[in-house]
Amino acid sequence: MWELELLLTLQVPDSGPLPVLAEVLNSLGSLLVWAVLVAVCSLVALALRRPWAALFIALSLASDLVAGLVKLVVERGRPEGAVVDVLFGTDSFSFPSGHVVRATALVAVLAWLLAPPRFRLPLALGLAFAAGLVMGYARVALGVHWPTDVLGGLSLGLAWFAFTAWLVTERASRAAV
């Protein structure tokens, strides 16, 4: 199976900078850290009197709910291993990677909001794709996700960003009229 071979190839060694990097990325992508980061960014946008930006940022939280629903529908098991059993137990689902969904959605939103209008879409997509791949590498390297879980998380994160970008810009333009 190609996924198992790729998973084994990407696993981090026991020492050196890669395990530390993978652990730091995993910590940043944890639900609690991510929720605090989203809340802080939303509050900053509100303080800058940008309520639509604050809403856009806050909506990235809902990407995690969508990912959870997809996990329940797909019910794909995680790769076997001691790390998986310790972190998640035996009944957790793998597809899509929630860490990747979170990283992709939030980075896309922040890039969209911070980029000059002319470069919004390419920067948002490019940086979100890069963030998703980096987070995905960490998840696969630790052996807690399959590579296709990362691709699913990347796709779902980008789709959530596109939906919320459309929703917020549509509502904001209606409110301005």
Image (cartoon, rainbow, N blue to C red):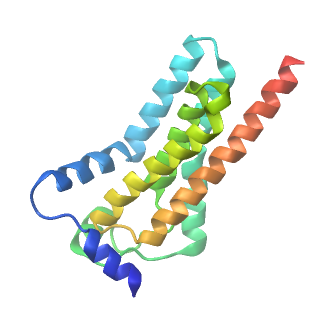
Which residue is the extreme one toward the left?
15
Counting the numbered discs, the total is: 0
Q: Quadrant of residue 68?
A: bottom right
Quadrant in which the N terminus appears: bottom left
Which residue is the extreme one toward the right?
177
Rendered location of residue 123, percent (x, y): 56, 38
Which residue is the extreme one toward the top?
48
Q: Write the residue at 64% across / 49% down.
A: 160
Does residue 49 lie above or below 151 as drawn? above
Rendered location of residue 145, percent (x, y): 38, 68
Quadrant in which the C terminus appears: top right
Evaluate whether residue 93 shows in this view: no
Q: Write the residue at 58% across / 36% down.
A: 109
Q: Quadrant of residue 88?
A: bottom left
Q: Write the residue at 32% across / 81% down.
A: 5
Does residue 35 lie above or below 138 as drawn? above
Which residue is the extreme one toward the bottom?
1
Q: Write the residue at 18% across / 56% down.
A: 19
| Closest to the observer, 22 or 36 | 22
| Closest to the observer, 4 or 81 | 4
Does residue 39 lie above or below 78 as drawn? above
Evaluate whether residue 158 shows in this view: yes
Does residue 29 lie above or below 15 as drawn? above
Rendered location of residue 154, percent (x, y): 53, 57
Rendered location of residue 43, percent (x, y): 52, 20
Residue 43 relative to residue 135: left or right: right
